[in-house]
Amino acid sequence: MIHKGMRSIQLASNVGLDLGGIAKGWSIQQMANQLKKKGTSLGAIDGGGDIVTWGPASKHWSIALSHPFDLSKNLMSIKVKSNSGIATSSVGKRLWKVNGHTHHHIIDGRISKPSSSELLQATVVSEDLTVSEVYAKCMLILGWDAGLRLAKMHHPSLEVIAVTKEGKVLIEKNAKGQVYHYGYSPRAI
């Protein structure tokens, strides 16, 4: 129920809302910004797959991306420039069943249901973790083509690594982007 006068929304007793994904990425970015302001010249914060790196331009960070079908393995490694934000989102985690149907936590606001694009996992790399977090979710909701068009329209330097539900790895590189090197073998999937 929307309370216009109170500027609030009241959820039904059987409804929950998790704003953790984007709020987590934003919080980690704010922590990094505060550490930089206080003089920490080199660092990285990993908040459960949402990562911020900073330091001199010559510094590169190696980041392992989890395998969406086998969490005990890595899908690939990337080497990113300092001052990067890396966010990975997946529809393969946070699952529940209702009437025998499996649902996940990435909700497509256009239909008020879990997204149904061809993507299982999306990693976005940019200069800001909050931006990466938002567009990782957009990729999962919109799918590869529409998600990439939206991302490139607003942030042309984004780089995206996605895995389809069939196991195909898709990579959108950018010559001026944050990823310095991709360590990937097609046999990883």
Image (tube, rainbow, N blue to C red):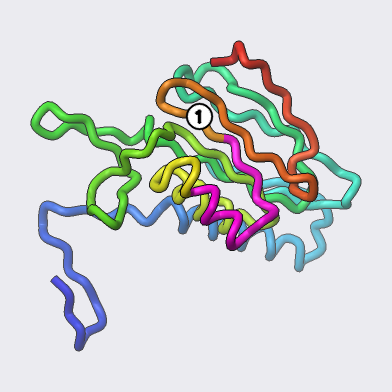
Magenta run includes residue 66 = no
Q: Nearer the viewer, residue 30 or 99?
A: 99
Q: Nearer the viewer, residue 93 or 44?
A: 93
Is 132 drawn above or below residue 96 in the view shown? below
Q: Quadrant of residue 75?
A: top right
Q: Quadrant of residue 123?
A: top right
Identify the residue at horizontal 68%, vertical 21% (top origin): 184
The image position of residue 93, as x and y in percent, is 37, 32
Identify the residue at horizontal 42%, vertical 32% (top origin): 120
Q: Looking at this rendering, what residue extends furthest in the right direction?
A: 58
Q: Looking at this rendering, what residue extends furthest in the bottom direction?
A: 5
The residue beneath circle 1 is 163
Query: Which image quarter is the C terminus in?
Result: top right
Residue 51 visible in the displayed image: no
The image position of residue 37, as x and y in percent, is 76, 68
Identify the residue at horizontal 63%, vertical 59% (top origin): 155
Residues rendered magenta in the picture: 147-161
With 163 as the anchor, is 82 left or right in this view? right
Residue 86 visible in the displayed image: yes
Magenta run includes residue 160 = yes
The image position of residue 167, as x and y in percent, is 47, 21
Label 1 element class? strand
The image position of residue 103, as x and y in percent, is 24, 36
With 89 as the anchor, is 43 left or right in this view? right
With 36 as the anchor, is 17 left or right in this view? left
Query: Which image quarter is the N terminus in?
Result: bottom left
Around disc 1, counting alpha carbons within 10 Å, would you say few (fewer than 14), some (14 to 19), or many (20 or more)? many
Is 161 drawn above or below residue 57 in the view shown? above
Amino acid under disc 1: Val
Q: Quadrant of residue 27?
A: bottom right
Q: Nearer the viewer, residue 182 or 5?
A: 182
Q: How many marks?
A: 1
